Image (cartoon, helix red, strand yellow):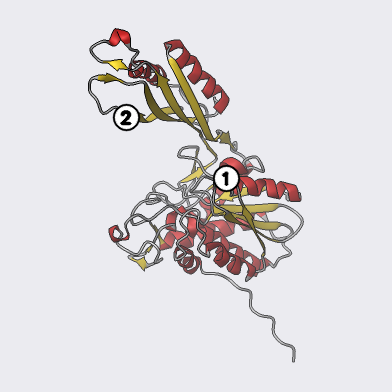
Amino acid sequence: MGVAAPAPVTLDPVALAQALIRRPSVTPKDEGAIGLLVAALEGIGFTCETVVFSEAGTADILNLYAKIGEGGRNLCFAGHTDVVPAGNPSDWTHDPFGGEIADGMLWGRGAADMKAAIACFTAAASCFVAERGAGFGGAISFLITGDEEGVSINGTRKMIDWLRGRGEKIDLCIVGEPTSARELGDMVKIGRRGSLNGRLTVFGTQGHTAYPHLADNPIHHLIRMLNAVTSEPLDQGSAHFQPSTLQIATVDVGNPATNVIPAAAHAVFNIRFNDLWTSSSVAAWLREKFDAEGGRYRLDIQVSGESFLTPPGPMSDLLSEAILLVLGRKPELSTTGGTSDARFIRDLCPVAEFGLAGGTAHKVDESVSVRDVEALTSVYKTVLDLYFPAA
């Protein structure tokens, strides 16, 4: 008698999410999180490659590219295993790295952002491969980093270049960020605003407050310059984006004396800009406004990402259909929120973001519904079924 073939492996998304949460992978530490994911993926037939990227002045980061299947289209799931710090553990109802289940919720740092989503796609892939085998006429891949919550230098940005250097083609990518707002499936992100940080230093002439004619107060110049860029909106928004915004984060002088006019004053601000702008055009607008107010200044600019949009079409249609089939609702296609690694992936292929509800992300008592974890797995599995239809 022949030996029966082993039954295909299918994974429990909740159990895998618990295991990932129990790895305290606070940026830039990995703490075995990616190794745990590698073991799960290799167990269902994926080929896994881990890559460490380095750069002077930054921590080394472990990244993962995993793939199953050959030929045809390549659907990629992207995400990050790193998390933000938990803060004081005593402030939490449950151990932030315990992965506990209580009251129908999965608790822990990374539950929402975004270890549970990684577990969901892994479990969905295991079910799909168990049904169809590895020869389904296409490829499923994972692009996972440990550097999304940090400086984002040695993670997805460099992985994109690494994939291009190998000639690896990805056709569509889903990023598992927690995009749902009030209930699972109510929102899909099809783009993001750009983000620019400005550090403005205005120079004056120090002197006595009783003799202002012998000095030049930089604070007065700074107030006028900041007013020039906050008194009117940058724009009224565009077809798929809300209006661009400028928010002042801090104003600093560091002057302990009440009778001294300081020599310099500083301000830091952040601009979230839509697709009516580029970082270059925003920078030019800032300098034009500041120059018009006079005064000596230095403006240092750091751009963490340009605005981008994946126009409504095949990418959003695929996700919307799967969400409607599983959850019975049609998602809003949105570009709200902060930045994510989708800003790098957009240079490689069409990308959209869809995951669990994000209301507790980065908060004390971060948690997600166990029922939602199971439902998200079903949505991802349906995405695979729709994208790779059986012959």
Which callout, 2 or 1, points at the residue further toward the start of the chain? 1
Q: Toward the viewer: 143 or 261?
A: 261
Residue 95 coordinates in the image, percent (x, y): 35, 64
- Contact check, label 2 and label 1, Cβ < 8 Å: no
Residue 158, relative to residue 65: is it above or below?
above
Residue 31 coordinates in the image, percent (x, y): 50, 63
SS assignment at label 2:
loop
Residue pointed to by mark 1 = 153
Q: CA distance from mark 2 to mark 1?
A: 32 Å
- Looking at the rendered image, the disc whose residue lies closer to the viewer, 2 or 1, is 2
Give the residue displayed 39% in from the left and 48% down from the top: 182
Q: Quick check: 180 left or right of 169?
A: left
Give the residue displayed 28% in from the left and 57% down from the top: 91
Q: Quick check: 255 left or right of 237?
A: left
Which residue type does callout 1 highlight?
Ile
Residue 156 coordinates in the image, percent (x, y): 60, 48
Could you say which disc has been placed on residue 254 in the image? 2
Give the residue displayed 74% in from the left and 64% down from the top: 135
Residue 208 coordinates in the image, percent (x, y): 26, 15
Q: Toward the viewer: 31 or 68?
A: 31
Residue 45, relative to residue 348: is it above or below?
below
Q: Quick check: 44 left or right of 358?
A: right
